[in-house]
Image (cartoon, rainbow, N blue to C red):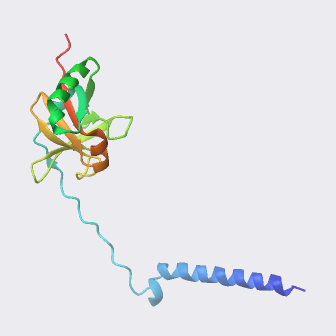
Amino acid sequence: MVNSRNARASLNLGMASLMALGLGACGSIGGFSLGGSQPAAVQEPAAPPELPATIRSEEIVGRWGLASYLNPSDRARTEKAAVAQCKNPYVIGAGPTGGVIMHLADQATPQELRLKGSQSGKNYIGPAGPIGEQDREIVSFDGRVMITRFVDKDAATRYGNMVYVRCAPRA
């Protein structure tokens, strides 16, 4: 003979299983209408096409002295400090698919990044796709000095304005 406590537990388990099975079936047979209509397919909006940057990746590939500043009045001093770093340069390499090899904020391993343009005419360096938090804005570039700033506010606060000064060719 089955005692009432075991019977009650078995009944509760059976009811819970039936309810779960019934709820699971609701979504698979078109809700409560028994297969009458299928939910409309949600189509994500197409990402806007990447705008080309006005700076070509070949223009920034090379050896660079690197330093940074937070206070704009420190820019000239920081450019001199970046020149001094040419004895241990930061190398921006050419990527296999036309981008540049650089580090993202807080990443130890460099990866291929793209140069991207924007509707406002600004240029950015970052992963393929729309301009986002991992990108850095190219604040200025004259072929010899490039200044960038991360789009992400936290990274911009930590890294400041990054000053890249092109190193002289090796002798």
Is residue 47 toward the left or the right of residue 40 in the image? left
Q: Residue furthest bottom?
A: 33
**Image quadrant where residue 80 sits:** top left
Q: Residue furthest right?
A: 1
**Image quadrant where residue 90 sits:** top left
Q: Nearer the viewer, residue 132 or 149?
A: 149
Is residue 20 toward the left or the right of residue 145 in the image? right
Residue sitting at 20 percent across and 13 percent down? 170
Residue 23 locus on image (x, y percent): 54, 81
Does residue 64 sit above or below 161 in this rendering? Answer: above
Q: Is residue 127 visible?
A: no
Residue sitting at 37 percent across and 39 percent down? 107
Q: Quadrant of the C terminus?
A: top left
Q: Quadrant of the N terminus?
A: bottom right
Q: Is residue 24 visible?
A: yes
Q: Residue furthest top?
A: 171
Residue sitting at 32 percent across and 37 percent down? 111
Residue sitting at 23 percent across and 62 percent down? 46
Residue 44 locus on image (x, y percent): 28, 66
Q: Nearer the viewer, residue 135 or 9?
A: 135
Residue 159 locus on image (x, y percent): 29, 39
